[in-house]
Amino acid sequence: FDIQEQKETESDVLLEEILCINCKKPMKGDDKKWYCECGMTVWKVTSGKLLSPVHLKQLMEQGQTEILKFISKKNKPFKTRLAVNDTRVEFDFDTGSGEGDESSRYMALDRKEIRVRVESAQPGIVDLTIESIDMPRFFQRINFGLGSTREAECMGIIVAADYARFYIPEYGEKTMRIQVNSEEFSSYILRETKPRDKEMQFLIQFAWKKLNEFRAFEAVYTPKRRRKTDGGNVSRKFPFGIFPWLEKVIESQGQEENIRVFLPHNPAVYRQFKASFHVAQLLEVDDDEYLIYEVPIELERALDTWFSMVAGSTSDTIKINTESEGSKTNEAKYPAE
């Protein structure tokens, strides 16, 4: 793989075709960095390594680069990967620093496993990573609103189980290996202790139901240095692609001031929705299939964007049916039970 061949490969990568891993908008660049309006930033020179558009494409599509060579502050060479962490790019020493080609990204993964890490450093917010040889590496920071770190980690596991179930046809033959940053929470997942809080009991039981669909699961307490998340516990942007299975069901009437949103009885879904739309009001309606929320008609476009983002769609808007007699609009499908 000579220099000329590498230059030709890099010339084939057009910046305007590289979409931000978080918001799926085109990346931009200047002399020092690549960036996106959502805050994602990738510096072109990192620890003595000049990054190319090829590396940027790897970061935005896979969440990490191949193993690269860098120079430390003490002028010593070292090898590792770069990985996306929210809107930043950091060294990823956890995946090793051995030589290898593109397939080395999965060298530590078994074909029969799905690897999940949930890490909450702030109430209501979780960093979720999902890895499997059957799909690209997934990373998102998800805001579930008011709640404890343990609740956020539990809902992260629910998201991971549904995500793997959607993208991996033979998920029932896989073992889900979960790394958590809370020893207490790992004991909850393994049923060694029972939480006293009723909401936490409900979330754990819901997570067990999801995890029991896999061949097996395990939870391991693997502490890391906790990084405090930026800002408060309210996200200014919607997480991308965390509910690819989500069915869009809404109802509106021509002259009504509110839109009704029908959400499944899945705590990860309705708590993320409520964290994104604080003004949403839960209606006291007895419905075995849905929880029904109302949001002001003024938030119609934001509602379109939320469904589009969490389902992983790159379309700008999804039209809402507003016929006078009222109707429901359905899009996307949850995998068959």
Image: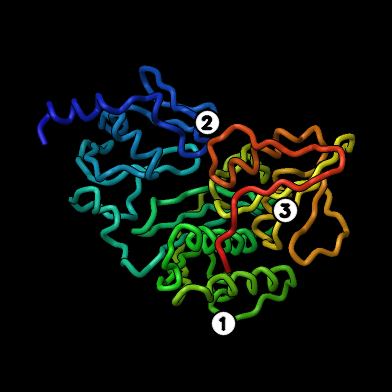
Disc 3 to disc 1, how far (Cα)? Answer: 26 Å
Q: Mark 3 belongs to which amino acid? A: Leu
How packed is label 2: few (under 14 Cα within 10 Å), some, or many (20 or more)?
few
Disc 3 to disc 2, how far (Cα)? Answer: 24 Å
Residue at x 71% of width, y 50% of height: 249
Q: In this figure, which residue is indicated by the disc labeled 2?
A: 39
Going by the picture, which residue comes out furthest to the bottom?
Answer: 192
How packed is label 3: few (under 14 Cα within 10 Å), some, or many (20 or more)?
some
Q: Mark 2 belongs to which amino acid? A: Gly
**Numbered circle sitting on residue 192:** 1
- Find residue 243 and report its horizontal and vertical position in percent: 58, 52
Residue at x 65% of width, y 62% of height: 151
Q: In this figure, which residue is indicated by the disc labeled 3?
A: 146
Q: Nearer the viewer, mark 1 or mark 2?
A: 2
Q: Is residue 143 left or right of residue 112?
A: right
56 relative to 150, above or below: above
Residue at x 36% of width, y 58% of height: 134
**In the rendered picture of this protein, how many numbered marks are placed on residues?**
3
Q: Is residue 121 visible?
A: no
- Find residue 159 and report its horizontal and vertical position in percent: 56, 59
What secondary structure is marked by label 2?
A: loop
Q: Is residue 275 left or right of residue 101?
A: right
135 relative to 174, above or below: above
**Which sits earlier in the primary sequence, circle 3 or circle 2?**
2
**Which sits earlier in the primary sequence, circle 3 or circle 1?**
3
Observer-nearest of 328 and 2 = 328
Q: Mark 1 belongs to which amino acid? A: Glu
